[in-house]
Amino acid sequence: MLNSPAPRESWLSYPYLIATEIGPQPVTSGKARGPFAVHRDHDGWRLTHLPTGALIGLADTETVAMETADMLVGIRNWSLPEEPTFIEKALVSAMLLDQCIHQPRRLKYWTPSAMTPGGAPLGA
């Protein structure tokens, strides 16, 4: 687990780590609430799953990223390390699409640390 969930009361400044192909990288200008965080990057607003540090999607605005995170909270217990069920994945994908949030090509937010830099599962 890369990060602890943030307090759930409101979005607040919260330093955290994101999972990248070169290893965990710090984010010092992000905001977080519960199991999700958002920060601005060169290509938009990144919605991150805090416990794993993995990218969930890329939004055009901070508001869209935050509102989507607030909607995703009710789908499952995001502190669980297990992979989401097929139905949970379908709900997440539908919500992201509905909010015009671009998903990463490899939606591996539940096991980002199990990926090699080339994107293949470790041991593959």
Image (cartoon, grey):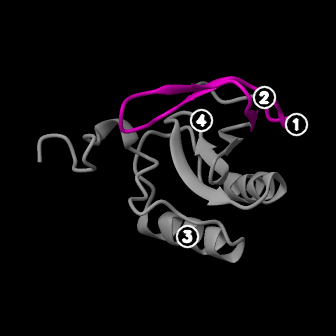
**Which residue occupies 41% across, 63% down?**
105
Is 108 positioned to the left or the right of 39 in the image? left
Q: Are marks 1 and 2 in contact (CB under 8 Å)?
A: yes
Residue assigned mark 1: 10
Whole-Å distance between the Cαs marked 1 and 2? 7 Å
Residues packed near mark 2 inside 10 Å, few (<14), some (14 to 19) or many (20 plus)? few
Residue 42 vs 91, above or below: the answer is above
Which badge, 2 or 3, is on the more N-terminal residue?
2
* Residue 93, disc: 3
Which three-letter amino acid code belongs to the residue tagged 2? Pro
Which badge, 4 or 2, is on the more N-terminal residue?
2
Which three-letter amino acid code belongs to the residue tagged 1? Ser
* Residue 50, disc: 4
Residues packed near mark 3 inside 10 Å, few (<14), some (14 to 19) or many (20 plus)? some
Q: In front of the other: label 4 or label 2?
A: 4
Q: Secondary structure at mark 4?
A: loop
Q: Secondary structure at mark 2?
A: loop
Q: Position of residue 73 (x, y in %)?
A: 69, 51
Q: Position of residue 11 (x, y in %)?
A: 84, 37
Q: Secondary structure at mark 3?
A: helix
Which three-letter amino acid code belongs to the residue tagged 3? Ser
- The magenta stretch is 8-32
Residue assigned mark 2: 7
